[in-house]
Image: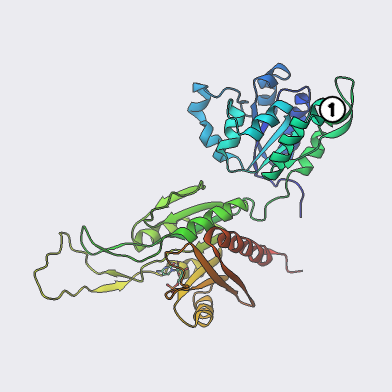
Amino acid sequence: MSTQPSAGSRILLGVGGGIAAYKSVELVRRLSEQGCEVQVVMTRAATAFVGPLTFQAVSGRPARVEMLDPGAEAGMGHIELARWADQILIAPATADLMARLAAGIADDLLTTLVLASPAPLAIAPAMNQQMWRHPATQDNLARLCARGVQVIGPGVGIQACGDEGPGRMLEPAEIAAALHPARPLDGARVLLTAGPTREPLDPVRYLGNRSSGRMGYALAEALTALGARVTLVSGPTALTPPPLEQVVQVETALQMHAEVIARAAACELFVATAAVADYRPVAPAETKIKKEHAALEIRLERNPDILAEVAAHRPAPFTVGFAAETERVEHYARGKLVDKGLDMIAANRVGGPRGGFEREENALTVLWSDGQRELPMMAKPRLARALAELIAERYLEHHAPSS
Ligand code: C5P
């Protein structure tokens, strides 16, 4: 596997105020050559070493410096910028910047973006060897490492100030190569349905179901963390969607069908977690149904099977379905895998004390044509991460050259 960020990665490069800032110009070039999009954000101190125009020239985007810059905010606001990034890399990271990052201080644009972004953070420290060795810096380093920050370098050698020891920023090529390996779904477009649907009976009533959408939303987030660009088509839920490429809110199965079919050709993976109503009222009443009669009959008609339709599309994306069963879980799930022509199906038991609906925890049996894996009972976000990794594994296997 490549050890370099893959083409298309969006890297927010933070430049701190140290003499090594001049090397970051070359770093932008290296990352761009690897196909990454680079947005430079400088601290004010950094501008004393290299002008923002230099970074603009090499990155093709104006370097951002000020937090409250109305012109820049009118383009991509700082929250959008925080969401835009797949990876934040700070090079050089000075002792002061490391201290502010460790303390969670957000007193300029760069440190604010770090707090506001879910993207992984890597830092390439650069400072005088005495400052690097100082217990305060070492404490900050330990805190950042404990939080999962990737620390690249520093190198050991002669420093700009004439000292010799640890604190030199690594060379741009070394930093570019040390960034986390490409994530398994980098750039893959995923279309994912989640939540229940509501089928109107009249203007105030509907047929619904108990799906909370939690598993689907957690899976959308977990797939995004693996590098996927996720479009979520969601039925009504009480959840706030995580930051995703696109979120489309729908109500009925027919609306979900239309939004999915319009996007199916443009995705590499389709994951159907939604609990789609199988039937809808034939003719929803235009006005509120009155309780005039002792009994009421409502005629229902079948909704389209969104998942089966996407799986039958040619070329079909890699399709992952869900099966909620009250009994013979594996048997029925394998039947659906075959009948709907899916690549993978995740089955869970519903009803009973260990059922998966409206719960914080769940367990899944995941099946594909020639294999299966058990994902035991765990909290839904963790289960979603385990399932996302399995989806990535099977998807990559599916696309592996067959030689
Ligand atoms: O056939 P069954 O409803 O049990 O299949 C469940 C799977 O099919 C789920 O992945 C669900 O999202 C999907 N489905 C769908 N459209 C429907 C019904 C189910 O996409 N109309």
Residue 179 appearing in the image: yes
Q: What element carries label 1?
A: helix
Q: Where does ligand 1 appear, by image quarter?
A: bottom left
Examine the rendered structure and indicate whether residue 225 appears above or below residue 92.
Answer: below
Q: In this view, does 266 lie above or below 375?
A: above
In this rendering, the count of numbered labels is 1
Q: Please determine whether, in this image, residue 257 is positioned above or below residue 92.
A: below
Choose between 358 and 205: the one closer to the eye.
Answer: 358
Q: In which quarter of the image is residue 38?
A: top right
Left or right relative to 154: residue 87:
left
Task: Please give the name of the residue rendered at 66% of the width and 64% of the height, measured from the top-left corner.
Answer: 393
Name the spot of residue 69 as percent of width and height, x first: 52, 22
Q: Split into 4 quadrants, where in the image is the N terminus?
A: bottom right
Which colour scheme appears in the figure? rainbow
Rendered residue at 27%/73% (across/down): 300
Is residue 266 in view from this perspective?
A: no
Residue sitting nearer the eye, 34 or 221: 221
Say left or right for 238 vs 266.
left
- Quadrant of the rendered structure where residue 401 is? bottom right
Residue 249 in picture, x, y percent from top left: 39, 52
Find residue 258 and report its horizontal and vertical position in percent. Answer: 39, 59
Identify residue type, mark 1. Answer: Gln
Q: In this view, does 359 lie to the left or right of 224?
A: left
Q: Residue 112's spot in the image, x, y percent? A: 57, 31
Q: Residue at x 21, y 58 (%)?
A: 204
What is the residue that sits farthest to the left in this orientation?
A: 292
List the residue tagged with mark 1: 129
Q: Which residue lies furthest to the front in this view?
A: 135
Image quadrant where one finds the C terminus = bottom right
The response on whether ligand 1 sits within 8 Å of label 1 is no
* Label 1, residues with CA under 10 Å away: few <14, some 14-19, many ≥20: many
